[in-house]
Image (spheres, grey):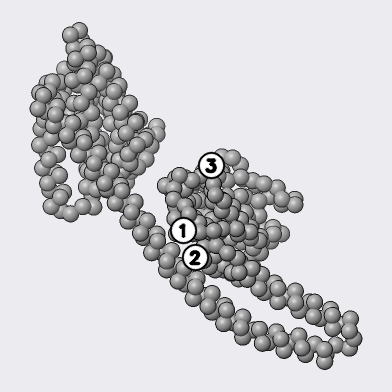
Amino acid sequence: MVRVLLELLELVYVLICVHQLYGKKLRVDLHSVVFILFASIVLDAVNRGMLPRSSPMFLYAGLYIYCIFEFGRYFAKALVNCILCIMIMSVFQLIFYFPTFMLIGELGNMSLERFVIHICCLVAIILLSKTVDLCTLSEYFLKREVALRVVSFITLVFFGIVLYQFKNLWTVSTGNYAFAIIFLVMIYVVVFQWQKARSEAEQRTAELKMQELCNSSFAELIAQVRMRQHDFNNHLNAILSMQYTSSSLEELKEKQNAYCEYICDENKFNRLLSSEGNLSMIGFLYSKFMEADKQGISVEYEVQIGTLKSPAGVYGLMEAAGILIDNAAEAVLSQEEETEKLIRCCLKETEEKISLQIWNAGRRYSQDEMERFFRRGYSTKGSGRGLGLENVKRIMERSRGEISVENREYYGCNYLIF
């Protein structure tokens, strides 16, 4: 019975590890329950002598099948993640073996030694998941060149032989112990470097995308300026001709006031262009506001910025602002007719921080709904959506920023504020 409990404890942190390799958290569902029950039956049969003592090793074949059903039919990825999971957890067992043996080995209680090792492994994988993204290790082996895969596979096979001896004899030599530490250090370095390289590549891709967007915004701005220049002469002629079509001074004043209000409304975003601050961000916001205005959405804004020095970078801030403005525009357009089509944007920079607020009029959301906004794949707009806010959250976390959402009443109307 004790042996079964120890094996089940090992399976628990193995499941945690394989979920981390997939970039997910372990949750209790049908697949995990079935896998644990299957493992319990096999281990009980081994203890009763109905199966060979080496049969628990075949549970890892069951782990492969579990990955297929739990995470989808990606056979190569499931195989890589299962092998990596076995390697990582076995390395932890090797590392914790010697300290445990030195402390309580004289007691001669093998079950106690294994229990301490398994507890240490469980704590280690939990701590490792909080500091290192193990999903990048899986991507490293799946995306790298064939030659590197072959070398890595040979290394894993050699290490697997050592692990098999350890699992059967539950003992290890000093050389194998040193090899385990070196292997773990190599894994950590690979994960760290790959994660760093991937982050830099994503940053460059985002900057290129934002640069293309800035170029298109600048081209649109030039087109708007040319159109305004053409309209300027027409406006002058219209105002001058009013004196000939008005029958009285009062009628002339009314026509001129009405026409001036129309011109001001047509050029309501010009104040943004004349403001000081980062020109890329100002041009980007101008294009987003014009885009919303063309959709029949009223835009109120307050922009007080400087150079926008931020760990997220100007392009990161532009990406986050663009996602939030697009989401707000989609939200107000999907509301009922009587709901005001209005969004508000407030971007301020001080010496201490940069704050961005996007308001959109709409229904009131519960706290549970707002907490689900930032989950990957969740969306109120249907399937295949829900990546925008998750990307905003990623940008904020990467730059040590914060993002929150709340409901707020404003002149009798509810606003959702990010």
On the question of residue 368 being in view, the answer is: yes
* Mark positioned earlier in the residue sequence (2 or 1): 2
Residue appearing at x 20%, y 26% in the figure: 95
Give the number of the disc on residue 371. Answer: 3
* Front label number (3 vs 2): 2
At which x and y percent is residue 207? 40, 61
Q: In this view, does 12 lie to the left or right of 263?
A: left
Give 385 or 340, whichever is nearer the viewer. Answer: 340
Residue located beneath label 2 in the image: 280
The residues tagged by marks 2 and 1 sit, at their Cα atoms, a distance apart of 8 Å
Give the number of the disc on residue 314. Answer: 1
Q: What element carries label 3?
A: helix
Q: Hey, what amino acid is under mark 2? A: Ser
Residue appearing at x 28%, y 43% in the figure: 192
Circle 1 packing at 10 Å, graded few (<14), some (14-19), many (20+), is some
At which x and y percent is residue 354? 54, 51
Up/down of 339 relative to 98, above or below: below
